[in-house]
Amino acid sequence: MMKTINKKERAQRLFAENIELFRCPLCHQGFLPDTSSGLRCRNNHHFDFARNGYLNLLATRQNTDYDRELFQARREVFEQGVYDPLVTRVSTLIRDLGFTQATVVDAGCGEGSLLVRLGELLDGPLLGVDIARDGIRLAGAHNTPVMWCVADLAQLPLRESSVDVVLNMLSPANYGEFRRVLKPQGYLIKVLPGTQYLQEVRTSLGDLPDYSNDGVLANLEANLLITNRERLHYHVPIAPEIWPSVFKMTPLTEHRVTLGEPAPELTIDLEIVCGVF
């Protein structure tokens, strides 16, 4: 009878198979190939696997306002299929770039639902990175072959020129680090909220100013040779019992009172920008 491996054992195997991608966040040396007791670099810095398989490779103290409740709400919203069109479009975009076995890093992966769904459509090593331990703990609970790390986007625990695609979806960015870890012909795919993104939530808060991503786009254009830019706009029916999770999943609603009745649908308005450094 074949032995069923647990999440920690699977993570040990995945990291061992892809150990050449990583470097120590403390001294920037590579890790040794034996992952049976965690990851150990050539300068003897050691990092243990958590029980559900993720690694904490954060070199500094965690600094995030996002908590488990927010990440749990995001998972519940993902499970309703709210972001399925985004998953489909991003997976198609990666294949259209010519990759068949792409090494993909989701930089700012949160609780991991989006990367897990992408893993059902793509081949190649997948790594989810987020500074929030609560998010990565939830990500590790997924029963899928994805490597998960607590790490800072400003100090990615990855070697130079090791990654085919960096995904940066509705998350802060560090273009210097993205440039460093991407291969010479690697791509950054950045997903930004459009002006109507979650407009029902914004309306329920009453007095929020209009959102603009002009500054982010200008920064992108200054750092990136943009090869593709498109808008993804659609509406998703939302059952009344899901609306509490919709409100909890965004920091927009923190310490604020919502007004009126929940809407019957939710607007998803996104801009997808792809390019090379």
Image: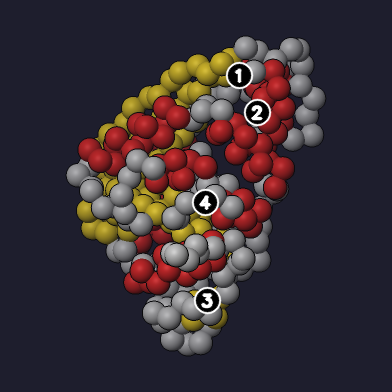
Within 10 Å of disc 4 (Cα), the crowding (few <14, some 14-19, many 20+) is: few
Residue 189 located left or right of residue 69: left
| Residue drawn at x 36%, y 69% as measured from the top left | 17
Q: CA distance from mark 3 to mark 1?
A: 42 Å
Residue 271 located left or right of residue 81: left
Image position, residue 102 (x, y; %): 29, 52
Query: Is residue 274 depicted above or below 257 in this figure?
Result: below
The circle drawn on residue 143 is 4
CB-based contact (under 8 Å), mark 1 and mark 2: yes
- Find numbered disc 3 in the image and state the secondary structure of the residue it sits on: loop
Residue type of the residue flagged with mark 2? Val
Residue 23 located left or right of residue 20: right
Image position, residue 266 (x, y; %): 57, 19
Observer-side mark, 1 or 2, equals 1
Observer-side mark, 3 or 4, equals 4
Q: Residue furthest bottom?
A: 43
| Residue drawn at x 42%, y 27% as measured from the top left | 85
Q: CA distance from mark 3 to mark 2?
A: 37 Å
- Residue named by callout 3: 38
Residue type of the residue flagged with mark 4? Asn
Q: Earlier in the sequence, mark 4 or mark 2?
A: 4
Image mark count: 4
- Find numbered disc 4 in the image and state the secondary structure of the residue it sits on: loop
CB-based contact (under 8 Å), mark 3 and mark 1: no
Query: Is residue 269 depicted above or below 175 in this figure?
Result: above
Residue 236 located left or right of residue 60: left
The circle drawn on residue 246 is 2
Residue type of the residue flagged with mark 3? Gly
Within 10 Å of disc 1 (Cα), the crowding (few <14, some 14-19, many 20+) is: some
Q: Earlier in the sequence, mark 4 or mark 1?
A: 4
Residue type of the residue flagged with mark 1? Ile
